[in-house]
Amino acid sequence: MSLLQVQALEVSYGPVLALRGIDLEVAAGEIVGLVGANGAGKSTLLRAISGLVKPRGGSIQFSRIELAAMASTRIVGSGIAHVPEGRRVWPDMSVAENLQLGGVRCSNAEKESDRLESVLGLFPELRSRVKQKAGTLSGGEQQMLAIGRGLMSRPKLLMLDEPSLGLAPVVVQRLKDLFRTLRSDGLTILLSEQNARLALGATDRAYVLAEGRILASGTPRELMNNADLISAYLGERADPAV
Ligand code: ATP
């Protein structure tokens, strides 16, 4: 069953049309990738889903509820968490405070301390640093904190914008393992990546975006078999088996 359904979505920034006729579906329990170069429209698509930019046309349905006209604060409460590009943690607040702020709009009845405990269970690297200021963490730890903060609202859909940017290969591998764990816990993930190797190595299906349009979609293997697509948009080193 489709958890997220985007149809004929159009978003513009003034005269700049950033998304043109986007159709996309994410089924419950899937990990879906959005792949494309800088400026392809990946961030804009995630921002439109979480209500940070308002579409000028089309529809976004989440659990069959229309989001296109809903305020972003209500969208978080409806079960979508958005981890933006650049892991914007609050540097002067502690790890625990950053996590607690992520749960402020949670509509789930579960106690905050229980949610905190369950998020820390996923991130041993944060558990030992709960009182430390977030700004003193490494880049990889800050990315884990940004994801943990998103998970504090107990989302059904976790959207991640370029999580691997600037991270060492060992941390990227940690992210891949984390996505599998989250999926086995029942979470659905929409992942935007310029790193085609991560996007195709960690997802069930992916959409390739260029200049605000969807050029192709399919399983990593189907996309990798499309030689023109690989050389033009995914880079020759992408390999879903890695
Ligand atoms: P990146 O990886 O650099 O974030 P992206 O695929 O996420 O790239 P977007 O950031 O969604 O792409 O940008 C899509 C298009 O919209 C680009 O042409 C970009 O210049 C334009 N754009 C993005 N944000 C704005 C804005 N706030 N005002 C005007 N144009 C914007």
Image (tube, grey):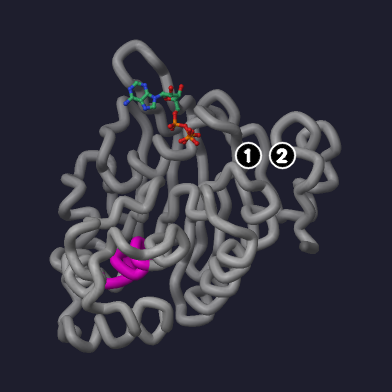
Dot 1: element: strand
Is 37 on the left-hand or right-hand side of 7?
right
Residue at which label 1 appears:
208
User: Is 112 a magenta residue?
Assistant: no
Type of amino acid under label 1: Val
**Is 149 within the magenta?**
yes
In the image, residue 26 lies at what x, y percent? 50, 56
**Residue 87 visible, this angle:** yes
Which residue does the image show at 60% across and 37% down from the upper left?
36
Mark 2: amino acid: Leu
Q: Quick one: quadrant of the C terminus?
A: bottom right
**In the visual, does 120 lie left or right of 185?**
left
Q: Read off the magenta span.
A: 145-152
Q: Is 118 placed above or below 239 here?
A: below
- Picture quadrant of ligand 1: top left
Q: Secondary structure at mark 2?
A: helix
Cα–Cα span, label 1 and label 2: 8 Å
The quadrant where residue 115 appears: bottom left
Q: Nearer the viewer, residue 123 or 212?
A: 123
- 181 vs 232, left or right, is left
Look at mark 2 in the image and give the residue it sits on.
Answer: 234
Q: Residue at x 54, y 31 (%)?
A: 38
Give 212 or 127, whichever is nearer the viewer. 127
Judge whether 41 appears above or below 226 on screen. Answer: above
Instruction: Name which quarter of the figure residue 180 lies in.
Output: bottom right
**162 to 69, vertically: above or below:** below
Q: Farthest residue toward the front?
A: 136
- From the top left corner, tell me how far across and down residue 78 is, in percent: 24, 62
Asked if residue 157 can be seen in this view, the reply is no
